[in-house]
Amino acid sequence: MPQSRKNAGPRLDPRRPLVFSTVDLDRSPGSVRKQTRSVPAPAHVHAGLAGVPEGADIELRVQLEAVSQGVLVTTTAQAPVTGECARCLEPVHDQVEVTFQELFEYPDADGAAAGEGYALHGDLLDLEPALHDALVLALPLAPLCREDCPGLCVECGALLAVAGPDHGHGPAVDPRWAGLQEAAARLTDPETGTAGQNGNGHRESAPGSPAGPDD
Ligand SMILES: [Zn+2]
Ligand SMILES: [Zn+2]
């Protein structure tokens, strides 16, 4: 929501759930007002495998503090998180709590904030962009369905949490070694002997050629 950065833009709609009024806040620096509010989650709060579902209930504790340049807003947000377990891809339901602080500056004569931050729109401020960014940063990069999730069987993809600790596929053979294992079996085969693949084994590639060194 770039309209709240820099340029104060059109007047905010005070009915929007993340618009806060500072009209009750005494503007002498140090004055503080606190409030709690339950708001629907903004859209697009996602990062990697996790996200806050749009419209989900977010509990906010908001402190508005008058400072010389504007209003310093300290917010603690508690939000539900859904996603996929990074190990087993099963659904994850979790909670995230994040605290963040933003300065909403008094606009200058042109209605723009003096610095790079957010601006007050008259007596109103829009917390949505700051809340969105804070939640995205707080999302787990690798959500887990549980701390000790055993993940998936690397051979068959079975859920190890369901299959149990005894799940296995016999002596493990890395597929990259399967060819070597066959060669080893031939080399030790009593019918061909340990030299089975040497010398005579190459004749089919040059059927009419003079005899090899073995002959
Ligand atoms: Zn898992
Ligand atoms: Zn398996």
Image: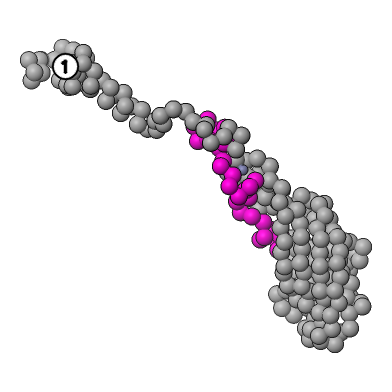
Return the x and y of residue 73 as percentages of the image width and height.
Answer: 78, 74
Q: Quadrant of the N terminus?
A: bottom right
Side of 6 where 203 appears, left or right: left
For the question of whether residue 109 can be seen, the reply is: no
> Circle 1 is placed at which residue position?
200
The kind of secondary structure element at disc 1 is helix
Side of 112 where 48 appears, left or right: left
Residue at left offset 71%, top offset 64%: 98
For the question of whether residue 212 can be seen, the reply is: yes
Q: Quadrant of the C terminus?
A: top left
Q: Is mark 1 within 8 Å of ligand 2?
A: no
Q: As shown in the figure, which amino acid type bears the numbered disc 1?
A: Asn
Residue at left offset 49%, top offset 31%: 168
Return the x and y of residue 137 as percentages of the image width and height.
Answer: 66, 61
Quadrant of residue 90 in the image? top right
Residue at left offset 86%, top offset 64%: 37
Badge 1 density bin: few <14, some 14–19, many ≥20, Cα 10 Å: some
Return the x and y of residue 108 as percentages of the image width and height.
Answer: 80, 81
Return the x and y of residue 136 as percentages of the image width and height.
Answer: 69, 58
Magenta-colored stretch includes residue 41: no
Q: Nearer the viewer, residue 164 or 153?
A: 164
Q: Is residue 62 above or below residue 83?
A: below
Side of 44 where 109 appears, left or right: right
Q: Nearer the viewer, residue 19 or 173?
A: 173
Q: Nearer the viewer, residue 118 or 76?
A: 76
Give the magenta range. Answer: 133-160
Number of residue marks: 1
